[in-house]
Amino acid sequence: MTRLHVISAATRPTSSGRPLAAWVADRARAHGGFEVTPVDLAEIALPFLDEPEYASSGVYAHQHTRDWSALVSSADAFLFVLPMYNGGFTAPFKNAVDFLYGEWQGKPVGLVSYSAGGTGGAPAAEMLLPVLTRLGMLPAGRSVAVPGINALVGEAGFEAPAGLTDELDGVLDDVAALAKEPAAV
Ligand SMILES: Cc1cc2nc3c(=O)[nH]c(=O)nc-3n(C[C@H](O)[C@H](O)[C@H](O)COP(=O)(O)O)c2cc1C
């Protein structure tokens, strides 16, 4: 089983993305082949990057970094569920990514973006791709963008529009395929 961490990148207490991330985690379980761990970045509650050494050293002075490192290390692959703020990815999420280095390397990642407007946060996902490749991650060829997020979230949670399940399954197929590929030598 591929250990898949579904990271909800939002930190606002009223995040509309949290119910979406819960739905994504459920779908990933239903897909099969994944041992799914939901991760809520708001609960991780990292400060601004405060490590004296580069993350590439793997030398961490702070317990919050060691905990974050252990959590990310325990994953074989990721889905990032990320909101778009002002046309890009969010500062707290980039901060959380920058805390670590080797823990991300060589691992497949699928992107599920969302926004209030019509783009579904696709520009934020596009902006993140060079960061992920710089880190040596393996981004899935397909991604999912969810527009109009606020209208899709209610008391019952996230209500998926028609076709979204199939789109997400495509991303999960890509992540599964990347996770099965033998490591490059
Ligand atoms: C600081 C900020 C900037 C935003 N910028 C955009 C934007 O550029 N385009 C857009 O469609 N929605 C924008 N939104 C709306 C968010 O996409 C929407 O509120 C979404 O629910 C945010 O994710 P969250 O609820 O998980 O924080 C912005 C929201 C915030 C808080």
Image (cartoon, rainbow, N blue to C red):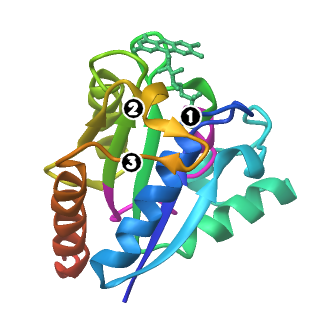
Whether disc 2's CB lies below 8 Å from ligand 1 is answered yes
Whether disc 1's CB lies below 8 Å from ligand 1 is answered yes
* In magenta segment, residue 108: yes
**Which quadrant would the N terminus be assigned to in this image?**
bottom left
Residue located 63% across and 31% down the image:
92
* In magenta segment, residue 143: no
Dot 3, how many residues are within 10 Å of its Cα: few (below 14), some (14-19), or many (20+)? some
Q: CA distance from mark 1 to mark 2?
A: 9 Å
Amino acid type, callout 2: Tyr
On screen, residue 4 above or below 126: below
Residue located 36% across and 15% down the image:
117
Amino acid type, callout 1: Ser
Q: CA distance from mark 3 to mark 2?
A: 23 Å
Residue that carries the numbered disc 3 in the rendered image? 135
| Residue 104: x %, y % from top left | 45, 58
| Residue 6: x %, y % from top left | 48, 60
Residue 88's tag is: none
- Dot 1 or dot 3, earlier in sequence: 1
Q: Secondary structure at mark 1?
A: loop
Residue 114's tag is: 2
Residue located 52% across and 63% down the image:
103
Residue range in magenta is: 94-109
Disc 1 and disc 3 in contact, CB within 8 angstroms: no
Q: Secondary structure at mark 2?
A: strand
Residue located 15% across and 49% down the image:
142
